[in-house]
Structure formats: structure tokens, C-alpha cells
Amino acid sequence: MTDLVLKSARLPDGRIADISIDRGVITHIGSSGPVDTTIDCRSCLCIPAAIDMHVHMRDGPQSAKEDWGTGTQSAVAGGVAAVVDQPNTMPPMESVENFSARVAHAHETSFCHFAINGSVTETADLTGLWEAGALAFGEMFAAPSSYGSALSPEVIRSSLVVLGNAGALTTVHAEEVRPGEVHSLVEHAMLRPVSGEAAAVDLVNSLAPANARLHYCHMSGAASIARVVTRPGNSYEVTPHHLFLSFEEQDPSNTHFRMNPPLRTKAERMELWRMFESIPVIASDHAPHTTLEKAQPFSTAPSGVPGVETMMPLLMNAVFEGKISLDAVVAKTVTNPYHILGLAAPKIAVGSRADIAVYAKQPEKILPERLHSRCGWTPYEGMAGVFPVTTVVGGVPAWHNGEFSRGEALWFAGKGKSFTAP
Ligand code: DOR
């Protein structure tokens, strides 16, 4: 008896078949035999579920914004089966003790697979965190942001020496911040310009020893990407908000569109679309803040937007509109990020871990009330998205027809994890 069958599903290569799943693994693709649970996938597209390699799941004292439960429900309801949590948490991921407590808590409450990155700060125990299972390090702040202070060039250099020698990936928040108070989206963009982002990329590239592996987070302009690719082996990500939103298209005083790096001009985001094919990774930088926090004056409102649940729907809508290819979306949200992180990517293939998202091809209006992040708002309100009807995580339908179930969420530890005797 097979555990689960996704019946009559359209596969990424266009075939229609039943996907049989046993103990979390795809065991057969073709016609199915006797089965415990069947999900009817007629006229639905089944693709490998995404990994979002840049999320802030908050929790602890920041649980009013989000916690592991709500953040990962939001992930699976958006076709994401794995998240990589950033270390600017409260408390920050600087010590093995904080890190191990977060891993244990995520194990108990996460609805999807997860990894946790280690902090890069002057006081972080880089070696201890690597041996405790940090998947990667960073985002490493080369400029101040919400819950992150800028590091000095000396700390960046010495940290990259340790992490390069360990073989760990370092993810970089590259920005330069000009002095001054900001009162609008345009001022915010001017004090954190693309030219500063490009200069910060140059600086970090110049401080990195040859063996350091760098991944640049949320690149917001073509000029910065041009600097990233000058160093062999570098990778980078672009966020949905820098692809789908620009400051000119918003009310200039609306703090909900304030994030770091800031929204750019429409011309700049069109430039990102022109180079879409060459972008290796799309990641959301899911950074929820409460509406109360966002109600502060522009100058003091925190930076960050939620996005883990809307990333795939926005991209899948663009696929169904014929604007981008399905292959490109799978490459940027599954194959490439898993490869960069040194993890095996799920596939629609026998033997693969069954992380599968099922899309019904129906666009919907993105509305805050149908989303699941605790923050309760979205910068994409009113835009079209194609949401998954089902997201299977390790063989369990973690999201199906509006209901959540917790299966076995895997912890993806990094390669430095020391052997622990059974
Ligand atoms: O806008 C942002 N918010 N950018 C960051 O780098 C941090 C994030 C947060 O944690 O809120």
C-alpha cells in the first residue's frame, strides 16, 4: 500500500502521471496501485517545492511579528518546503547555546524543512557554530539594517579568513548608508543607493581571501550585480520585491514599502527583468514587522517586508502569463539555491525526497486575509498570484486545501557539523 499518490498530475516536462510517495520519497511515477491517501491533481501542475534561502522567522521576544509556526505555515501555503533562517534574531545566533536552542525549537514547531545560519559579528563563535551545524554564515552586515550593525572591514576580513578555511558559505548584506534622516521612500533609496551597494560589493570582494565562498543577498541594481560577478565563484539572489515593486509606484510616505536595500525606480527593476535569465537565485528576504511598528513615522519605522508566501505565487503567475519559463523559476527557487547551499535538491523523480508543490493555474488577487504570516499585511496587496493548492513536505501534505499538517520537518545542518555518537 502506497502512503500517498498525487493522481493525474501534470509534471514539469508536460507528462501526466501519478506520483507515488512512500516514507517521504517518490517511489514511482506512472500509474499507481493501492494507496492510503490520494490527492486528485487533475489539471494541476506539480513541481519540486521551493527553498527560500533568505527568511527571518523571528520568534522569541519578536513573536508578535512572526514565529516558527506562523512563518513556516506561511512558507508551505506559498509552495516553499524549506527555509534558511537569518541570524539577526533575538538573541542573535552568535553562540552555540543560542543556536542549539533555536534548532530545537524549530524542530518542535516548523511546518517545513529548515536551516539556520550563524551570525558574523566580532563576538560570534564562528568555529563553534560551524561545528554545531550552521548551514552558512550571514547575512553578514556590511551596513546597518534592522537588527544588524555594520561590521568593520577588519572584522569582515578576519571572519572571512576563518569561514574560508572552514569551507563555509558566507552570505553578505552589501550596502553603504549615507548620513541623514529619511522621510520618504525616495529619500530612503537616495541614502542607500545602488552605487553604494556596488561599492560595498567591491569592498567585501577585496577583503575576501581566495578560498572564501560568498553569496550576495538581495541585490537591488544591475550595477551591483555587475560587481558581484567579477569575483569567480560568487553567487547572488534577487528578491521578489525588487522585481515586482518600485518606489515610484507607491505612496512615498508608506512605511510598508520600506526595506533594506530599498525599492528602486521602475527603470531599475525593468533592468533586473532584462537580466532575469542570468539571476541565479530568487529569495524573499521575508522580514515581517507588525502594523503597529510600521505605523511609526517614516524616519523610525523598521525596514522589512513579509514575502515567503507570495514569492512563488508571483513567479508562477508570471509563468502562467507566459512572461517567464517554468524551468527558470525551478532553477532559481530550487536547483540553484540547493546547489549553492551544498544540499541535494528535490526533483520530480523516483528516489527524490517528496517536496512537491501543486498549482491549480488559477490566478487570485493577493489579499492579506488569505495569507498566514502573523504580521497580517503584504506589500503585494491587489496583485495577482497563483497559489499552491497542496504543498507536500517530505511526503506529508503540509498544506492541502486550506489546512495545515505537521510532518517531519528536516533540519539541514551544514557540512561542519561534528559527529555526535548515537
Ligand atoms: O529590510 C530588511 N529587514 N533588511 C534586512 O537586512 C534586515 C531585515 C529585518 O530583519 O527586518
Image: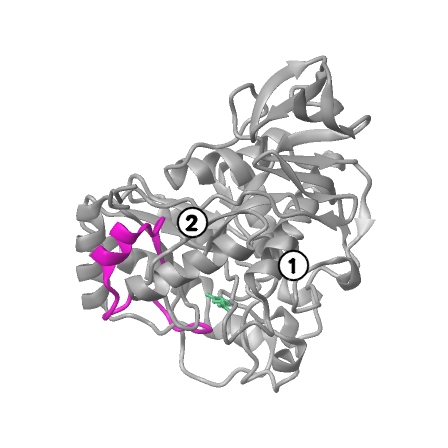
Q: Residue at x 54, y 85 (%)?
A: 300
The secondary element bearing badge 1 is classed as: loop
- x, y percentage for residue 387? 74, 45
On residue 13, which mark appears? none
Q: Quadrant of the N terminus?
A: top right
Q: Is residue 368 visible?
A: yes
- CA gap, disc 2 and disc 1: 18 Å
Q: Is residue 227 visible?
A: no
Residue 49, placed above or below residue 108? above
Name the outermost residue toward the front: 422
Q: Residue at x 61, y 87 (%)?
A: 297
Residue 290, placed above or below residue 132? below
Q: Amino acid at mark 1?
A: Leu
Residue assigned mark 1: 245
Residue assigned mark 2: 225
Residue nearer the viewer, 165 or 62: 62
- x, y percentage for residue 263? 57, 64
- x, y percentage for residue 381? 75, 61
Residue nearer the viewer, 125 or 14: 125
Residue 398, placed above or below residue 129? above
Q: Which residues are magenta?
A: 121-147
Magenta segment: does it hold 239? Answer: no
The secondary element bearing badge 2 is classed as: helix
Residue nearer the viewer, 258 or 191: 258
Q: Amino acid at mark 2?
A: Ile
